[in-house]
Image (tube, helix red, strand yellow):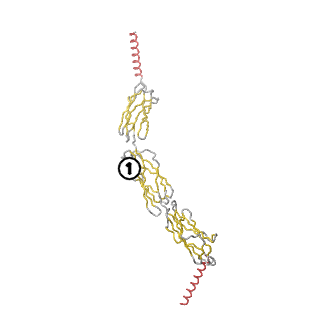
Amino acid sequence: MTSTYQKGIFLLLIVALMGVTFVSAEFYDTNTPYLRITVEEVTPEPVEPGQDLVVKIRLSNEGGKVAEDVSLKLNAEFPFFVKTESNNFEDKKTLCVGCSISNTYYLIVDANAKSGLYPLTADIYSGSMLITPSETINIKIVGKPDIVLRTDAIAANVSPGDMFVVSFDAKNIGTGIARNIKITPQSDSFLMLGSNINLLNELLPEQTISFSSEFMVKESLSPDTYKFPVKLDYVDEQGNSHTTSFDIGINVLNKADLSIQSIKIKPIMPTQLDDVHMAGIIENTGGGNADKVTVELMTAEGKAYKSFIGQLKADDDAPFYFDAKPDAAGMRTATLKVTYNDDFGLHTFETAVSQEVRKPTNNLLLIIAVIALVVAGSAYFYFKKKS
């Protein structure tokens, strides 16, 4: 039993040794040199833009013959620059079987390098001939994000109680990726409608994301020039938190709001021969004063009558009057045109006023005719007597 067990172990060892010999024979010819590059150190890992980087490489001859005139060239391209090295691998060297040499490269990473994997390649030469494929060393660079928040000038003038829209551009001017970005207004006077927060999942270096938010001005806010802060929170690729703040400038202005409160017309049903008297009241229900207020009456026939009111303060009202004579019978429509100025500029609105104008009755015409005859007769006798 023991003898059989020992024989089994012996056979397994022979198979294992044969397997090792077979695998080794696949990698290189034992009668030639076999050069291999081993990366012994990359510090720091990962590396940040602008930092120094140390890369240590060992070159070994694992073949069965001496390697003559061996050299190694490290291809350092953007974003890597070689500052110095401990042992010049580009000088021709002889490597005996089983021998190795090492070299430490001191590099610097370009400050503008973006996050990502960047290759360093190493070529082995025998004389001037490349004898093995290039060895690639992947270096991970992790940059730092830097987000700036820009806004366009707010197009609409606003007053207390108004809603307005702000268009934002969030741009990552840094070298790293920003994630879980939160934009939150920090003001009790300017409230963002909705969830009061904007979320962006990710912002790559040099990427810009545009978005809009709707805000409301608090009713009790006094007209003035304001700046309200917006806070920006995000994390970088290594989980570090970053917070910054930006100010948004806005002008809150006084706003007048004029309307016709009432209109009275006498007589209620005039005729063509009546003098029509219109009396009205105009009021300012806004929070600002209205200046250069005028009310103009324009008839359907093109006649115009103007009433100049001047200034109308907030929560105040003023009367206006017109006296006019109808031009024709029937349903007549005139237009009241109101013009005024406030902090937002010039404003105009119109209101239509309709009134039925009757034709004179026969009795009225007779009375008018009699009066006309009496006046004419009196004038005749007066002038005759005088002559």
Judge whether 253 appears above or below 9 on screen: above
- Residue beneath the point at 39% across and 53% down: 186
**Callout 1: 10 Å neighbours few (<14), some, many (20+)?**
some
Q: Nearer the viewer, residue 344 or 199?
A: 344
For mark 1, give the secondary structure.
Answer: loop
Q: Quadrant of the C terminus?
A: top left
Pinpoint residue 31: horizontal percent, then vertical percent.
63, 78
Seen in the image, is 281 located left or right of residue 20? left
Say which quarter of the image contains residue 381: top left
Residue 368 in view, yes or no? yes
Q: Quadrant of the N terminus?
A: bottom right
Pinpoint residue 357: horizontal percent, then vertical percent.
42, 28
Identify which amino acid the numbered label 1 is placed on.
Answer: Ser
Say which quarter of the image contains residue 384: top left
Residue 196 in view, yes or no? no
Pinpoint residue 263: horizontal percent, then vertical percent.
38, 33
Q: Nearer the viewer, residue 193 or 268?
A: 193
Seen in the image, is 273 located left or right of residue 136? left
According to the picture, the residue beneath numbered tag 1 turns out to be: 189
Judge whether 209 appears above or below 108 on screen: above
Q: Nearer the viewer, residue 41 or 178?
A: 41
Q: Count the labels in the image.
A: 1
